[in-house]
Image (tube, grey):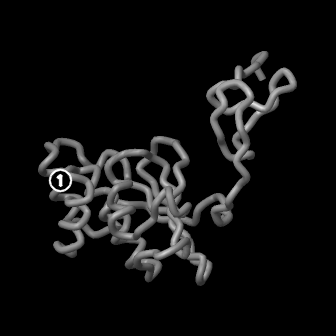
Amino acid sequence: MDKVLWEKAVAFHGHECPGLAIGFMACEAAVEKMGIGTSDDEQIVCVTENDACGVDAVQALLSCTIGKGNLIYHGTGKQAFSFFNRTNGKKLRVCLKPEKNKGMDRTQWKEYLLSAPVDEIFTFSEPTFDLPERARLFNTVICEICGEGAPEHKMHLQDGKTVCVGCFKSYSRGW
């Protein structure tokens, strides 16, 4: 484990915890198995399946961020991260093995995560989905109800008016 990088992740996140250690080690695994580093634009993409502490490690260490469009949230709740390298086409899904922390308190679990080989704590597979397209810029459209602007791909048509997600009244009959 690279202690300097761990301290960088801790400084970004605000404290040490097992969740941060999961994300830290997922990044270490991606670096080791894919040969990736930080991403100044969208060369490296991470699709995270959770919105927990480990995502902060991905932001701090690999420079994948929602703002750049190379950190994408797909909320399955799993401690899983899919990494893509746009430069060479490599891709890898890293998923925490279940129930490894039985009988450990938080400190023991964190220490175990930071010291165990990545192959012991994660399963590795190819993502089941394709590399997401690059981030695009969209025209801003004004909601005819609230008057606020939103990108055109987020707008809906309702009662003949263009409305934003917040003003849209969803309709469903169970399908």
Position of residue 102 in the picture relative to residue 43 (left or right): left
Q: Nearer the viewer, residue 137 or 94?
A: 137
Horizontal and vertical percent position of residue 48: 48, 54
Give the vertical position of 65 relative to 61 (above or below): above
Amino acid at the residue labelled 1: Glu
Q: Quadrant of the N terminus?
A: bottom left
Give the vertical position of 55 relative to 93 (above or below): above
Q: Identify the residue at image location x=55%, y=70%.
A: 84
Q: Identify the residue at image location x=68%, y=61%.
A: 136
Q: Quadrant of residue 152?
A: top right
For disc 1, the neighbor class at 10 Å (few under 14, some 14 to 19, many from 20) is some
Horizontal and vertical percent position of residue 118: 32, 68
Horizontal and vertical percent position of residue 78: 45, 46
Q: Quadrant of residue 106?
A: top left
Q: Nearer the viewer, residue 105 or 120?
A: 105
Q: Identify the residue at image location x=38%, y=78%.
A: 32
Return the residue found at the far right. Answer: 160
Q: Quadrant of the C terminus?
A: top right
Position of residue 118 in the picture relative to residue 30 (left or right): left
Give the vertical position of 85 relative to 15 (above or below): below
Q: Report which residue position mark 1 lands on.
A: 16
Q: Identify the residue at image location x=26%, y=59%.
A: 12
Indicate the secondary structure of the residue bearing disc 1.
loop
Q: Nearer the viewer, residue 150 or 51?
A: 150
Q: How many marks?
A: 1
Give the vertical position of 24 relative to 4 (above or below): above
